[in-house]
Image (cartoon, grey):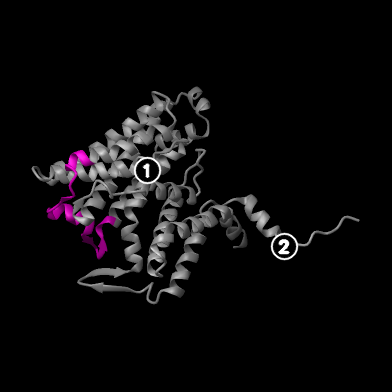
Amino acid sequence: MKQILYKFTRTKIFWPILALAVLLILNLLLIPGFFSIEIKDGHLFGSLIDILNRVVPLLIISIGMTIVIAKEGIDISVGSVLAISGALAASIMESSSVWVALIAAIGIGIVCGLWNGMLVSVFDIQPMVATLILLIVGRGIAQLITGGQILTIDNKIYDYIGSGFLLGLPFPIFIGLAVFLILLYMKKRTALGLFIESIGNNMTASKFAGIQPKRIILIGYAICGVCAAIAGIIVSANVSSADANNAGLWIELDAILAVVIGGTSMRGGRYFLSGTVVGALFIQSLTTTIYSVGINPQIIMVVKAIAVIIVCLFQSEKFRLAFLQFGKKKVPLQ
């Protein structure tokens, strides 16, 4: 048993799980009834359900971001892609069916992902610079689609995606679970999952092994674009409107943090989808905690940054060794 526990403490996912557990215990002490769950009209309500529901857009984007980071890339345009997909879906629903709107929203996510992937793989532009273009231009495109207005959505099927219930739980939770399971299957059971990890570890060696990195990079960014589009649909469906300016604002930073907290290195290579899920849950729990305890909104980002820095530092073995050695008396040499 001790060996199993010791091995678990050496895994990448141990520290994010420990941080999440500490945060939940802190909530238990600070917020009365934090763990209580009520049933109203056959639906479950409570702080934990609220966290699971609100984390879904961030979770889906973070999973897509993990695929991109695994091959030593990054996509900082996911917030803009989220806004574009939501705006396009809302705009199309004014004159067409909800199914056409959903297909178009997913389609624009693929196009945006392929655009980023083409800049990175074909034209060899640095991932940060390549995706910065769509980060800046994307919100302008969303503004053009909406005509600079906040489009309201009045469609029962679309509303159900963002605020409906299934088996007593909010429907977005099932969408997030489905995306996670599909990409986990891709990672564990398909060659694509292995190829992504391979080119992240060593692209040159992958080329000699017969893998085509450019094609894998294109697919990786396309997956990330689809994830951002799904998140855009959920966000716009949840509030029954498309806001080109504020939808998904700065969500790309939270997604990158969730991936890093989950144990995936920014240098590429091995990636941990389960760790990313825990990282996203930690960030959403932290956000809920900050709002619940009434911290001044002006310093929320500072509190969030400090908490994330502490978690990341404890993931570093060198920092942990230095921390454990701190305060110990040095034995003088004879």
Q: Nearer the viewer, residue 27 or 15?
A: 27
Residue 152 or residue 107, whichever sits in front: 152
Q: Is residue 277 left or right of residue 228?
A: right
Q: Is residue 192 above or below residue 235?
A: above
- Which label sits in the foreground, 2 or 1? 2
How many angstroms separate mark 2 from mark 1 (CA)? 42 Å
Horizontally, residue 9 falls left or right of residue 244, namely right
Residue at image point 52% right, 30% down: 202
Q: Which residue is mark 2?
A: 327
Q: Are marks 2 and 1 in contact (CB under 8 Å)?
A: no
Picture layout, residue 145 above or below residue 309: above
Q: Characterize the local packing of mark 2: few (<14), some (14-19) or many (20 or more) Cα atoms within 10 angstroms.
A: few
Q: Position of residue 14 (x, y in %)?
A: 53, 56
Amino acid under disc 2 = Gly
Reading the image, the residue beneath label 1 is 64
Q: Which residues are magenta?
A: 143-172
Which kind of residue does numbered mark 1 sit on? Gly
Instruction: Describe the element under mark 1 as helix, strand or loop.
Output: helix
Work out which residue is located at the far bottom of the displayed protein and give it.
32
Residue drawn 28% across and 50% down?
A: 246
Near mark 1 (Cα within 10 A), the count class, few <14, some 14-19 or many ≥20, is many
Q: Position of residue 156 (x, y in %)?
A: 13, 55
Assign the C terminus to one quadrant of the image: bottom right
**Quick one: label 2 or label 1, which is nearer the N terminus?**
1
Q: Position of residue 18 (x, y in %)?
A: 52, 61
Q: Residue at x 28, y 52 (%)?
A: 175
Name the element at disc 2: loop
| Residue 220 shows in this picture | no
In this picture, is 234 found above or below 123?
Answer: below
Residue 30 percent coordinates (x, y)? 44, 74
Residue farthest to the front, as pictured: 298
Q: Quadrant of residue 159?
A: bottom left
